[in-house]
Amino acid sequence: MADPTTYLSHLELGEPDKTFLDSSELIINMGPQHPATHGVLRVILKLDGEKVLGTECVIGYLHRGVEKIAEHRTYTMFNPYVDRMDYVAAVSNGLGYCEAVEKLLNIEAPPRAKYIRVILTELNRIASHQLWLGTHALDIGAMTPLFYTFRDREEILKIFEKYCGARLTTHAFRIGGCQYETYEGFEQDVKKFLDFVPPRIDEYEELLTTNRIWVERTREVGKISAADCKALGVTGPVLRASGVKWDIRKALPYANYSEFDFDIPTGANGDTFDRYMVRMQEMRQSLRIIRQAVERIPEGPIMAKVPKVMKPPVGEVYHSIEAPKGELGYFIVSDGSTQPYRVRVRPPSFVNLQALDIMVRGQLVADVIAVIGTLDIVLGEVDR
Amino acid sequence: MIPITTLHYLVTAAALFVLGVIGVLTRRNVVIVLMSIELILNAVNLNLVAFSRIWGLHGQVFAIFVITDAAAEAAVGLGILIAFFRNKETVNVDEVDLLKW
Amino acid sequence: MLDYVTSYLGMNTTPGQAGNVFWALIYILVVFAGVSVAVMAMNWLERKALAHFQIRLGPMRVGPHGLLQPIADAVKLMTKEDIIPAEADAFVFWIAPLIILCASFTVYIVIPFGPTHAITDLNIGVLFMLGVSSLSVLGVVMAGWASNSHYPLLGALRSSAQMISYEVAMGMAVVSAILMTSLNKTGTGTLSMIGIVEAQQQQQIWFLFKFFPFGFIAFAIFAIAMVAETNRAPFDLPEAESELTAGFHTEYSGLRWSLFMLGEYAAMIAVSSIAVTLWLGGWLRPFPNTLTGATWDLVFSLLPGFTFLGLALIAFIGVIRMPKHPYFRIQTMGLAGFAVVLGIIGLVLFIPPVRDRIQDIFWFVAKVAVFMYLYIWYRATFPRYRFDQLMRVGWKVLLPVAIGVLIMTAILGVVL
Amino acid sequence: MAPVATGFFFYFLSGLTLLGGILVITQKNPVHSALALILGLLSQAGLYLMLYAPFVAGVQIILYAGGIMVLFLFVIMLVSIERTQREEQFNKLWLVGLLSAGALGALFVLVYAKGTGLFPEGAAPPAESNNTQQVGQLLYGQYMFSFEIASLLLLVAIIGAVVMAKRRT
């Protein structure tokens, strides 16, 4: 491995505050094996005492070449691979891919399939946010929320397991709809979950929202302005916490999100606390969407008419959805064969991770941890 | 065994004092020179406390004053040391040969 | 031999004061063994209680309800490879955990578990305990420096700065308690730990409630500062797992690491004992003034026995609730044996001579146990402070308040 | 309480004190020197206890070993020591130093040999049980003024240390 300083050489780093020793610059490798970098992220920190002068993320430790694999698989065969990118929100990934290919093939999933998709995707959003909350709180030092969120996430995973047999990498959807009809009692399970989870979310908030230490640790930490967010292409809750009301479910509705009534929670300061609040409210909004979907779910087929051998016309398509972490886009180029010519994924975690440097400059080491947590990155998606 | 008298303590203190003086005079590292000064102060303290067994508690009070003084001296001395190290990147006394920087 | 023991039992001073080297040695051994066992029990209790806070079960495999887990851990740690990093300063690396351990165990010399149950009673008891417990900073600094690695160094700098800062507020709070001891006819206070408890007995009030709310505020400051002093949550940022991996003991493993843990838990128990001695009446039983008379004395002296019988009852309920599967037979038998042992201890505590000598220790330990539970509770509830916030709390909140309380205590002491 | 085994403890503790002193001035690594100094300071605290001065012993532990030495260790860590360890440890004056120290030692020997009468033995040792109170009364009574000056000195030292360590801009 090269000297870590070479990574930092191209960065315009702030000058160390020369009130104490001159030689106090400290270069620390945080990761790839570190308890708080959520997998295998390696952050090289240049520190002046405890103050962060600059950061450099080194990624790629989890690179599996998903996009390249796509070029050697048929459209259908590639579908399970997308689950392995953001393995915390596998359902969203599948939804985005399926819809993108559907767009390319110019077919549309039947209404019932769309409702099932919305229900599962929103459940997945809650699960993803719960996992984020648990790990984020653990990074900041609150151990207990982790176990509470995992307890409640279990209920969602149970629904997934009953529906498609898998808990994490679900492969729930197929191009053209869903493969499986909902199981007996699916609606009851979802309704039970809808009643079960709001008090639990209140419980998390009780532990954290009014906790003085939590508020002090997150307020004014990792601030990022709306302009910076836009410049970097940051999306999702991070962008919304900076006050930009941008949610693809509303802005460019996909599936049948236009039929549902829900709000887009936004923050004002763009600090870690706002991002926390935005995600907490998003969980409640997701519950609203699920409730409407479960009540209105129509009868009918779940699979559109899809050719046995998928040969999309020559062309390209970009389709993006609002994944739990931000805008998840699929850019697929077809050369008319059974395999895509090129697939490019726009992963929200990867784009959001760029904001890390802006967010932590001038702050303390402990804030780096808080900010990595609040960005809600999944390394599987960053490295693909 | 000979009973332990005040003289025993005084001899210990004297030996400690001489050790401190040797350290101050011969070492180059400022930190160790400062520590040797602490040794000297401690030798004095030991004397004061040993005498206080005979002459009353005044010696102990003075020992406390000496400890206070040692704290002040250490703080200022180490402050100077840091300022010096910052400018000359060394902690050797015999390189402190300029009256300015 | 028996005569010797009984003659000692009639004595009303600590072995250290009596100059009785033999009994002092016995006391030292008993306290050392007792604290080591308490640390192991605390280890199990922390994991268990924390697990139940967090809807988990905690250790369940080794022994019934994981009762033997600490022993298994100790064996594992002792048999692990002893690693000293190549770049480390081997001697300092070797001695640092010993310093911490010695510092936290030496404090027990002056802790009075009862009017005569202390190794010795120094007349500078409180000063001694503050000084010795502050020596553990040295161990922390050395461990961080000797590891020759960035995370430990940062952890050591953080940790030592934190311990020194909170020591100031802690000292101020202690001084206000010592001031209270001087509120008697002669007007002379004491620094002796036994003397402080006796002063509370004479003044017929725990210093916690003296000059309410000032005694209480001083106590609260001490209670906060002692958590910071022992580097426990929410002030555990020197060991912040998510930031500095493990702080100053990142490079330590095996037995040396376990020495750090032993030292940390021993220090927790020690500072809790100090808080109990200074503010919660030490070995005095609750309501020694209002609920007096032979009947109440009898009732309170029976409580230790009943406590152990209660524990035995809980263990028996555990036995009944054990799965009736052959796999669990040995575990069930073990738990039943444990319950029987607890029950026998409970019954022994009813014997009048034992009862009289043991109840001081019982009340002291019970009060300390409350603090131990608080430590676990904090850890389950609070996130971690950031370094600058921690310093701000220490210097800008606790210290001024402590000085204010000290001045108010002095004024009230003169006026009243 | 009378100290037990006075002879043993005196020789043991003063031996440790002197060993600490020797190690302080001979060690290459300043951290080892500081460790040796701590050893010396602690055994000296033991000597104070034997001299019926428990309060001074407590102050020695809490201030010297717990406070000043931590400051020393901090500074040693901040100034890089790798380079200084490789350099020459003793300056060119070591012969002069040893000679003058020897002369000083000879002076001590002379004084103690001649002046044994100055240190009468058998004076009643001060009561240990209220040592702290007596020291306190002296400090806040007879030596009140000196005490205040000492506190002023500490204040000046704090300000001085901060000014020194802060970079002039």
Image: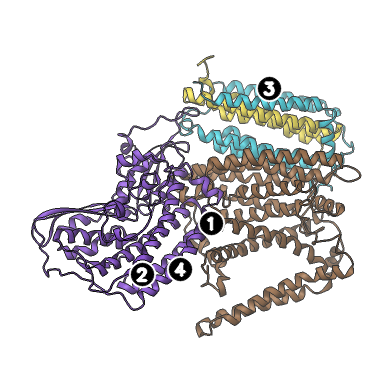
Chain colours: A purple, B yellow, C brown, D cyan
- Observer-side mark, 2 or 4, equals 2
Q: Work out whether C30 lies above or below B21.
A: below
Task: Name the chain under label 2.
Answer: A
Closer-to-camera residue (D140/A231): A231
Q: Are marks 2 and 1 on the same chain?
A: yes
Which residue matches tag 4? A195
Q: Which mark is residue A207?
A: 1
- Observer-side mark, 1 or 4, equals 4
Q: Earlier in the sequence, mark 1 or mark 4?
A: 4
Residue D16 placement (x, y as % from top left): 67, 41
* Cα–Cα span, label 3 and label 4: 91 Å
Residue B57 placement (x, y as % from top left): 84, 33
Q: Are marks 1 and 3 in contact (CB under 8 Å)?
A: no
Mark 2 residue type: Glu
Residue lying at 77% horizontally and 38% vertically, measured from the top left: C407
Q: Work out whether A360 lies above or below A146.
A: above
Task: Name the chain under label 3.
Answer: D
Q: Which mark is residue D103?
A: 3
- Using the rendered image of the protein, determine whether residue B72 is visible from the camera's viewpoint: yes
Q: Are marks 1 and 3 on the same chain?
A: no
- Observer-side mark, 1 or 3, equals 1
Q: Are marks 1 and 4 on the same chain?
A: yes
Q: Work out whether A204 lies above or below D109.
A: below
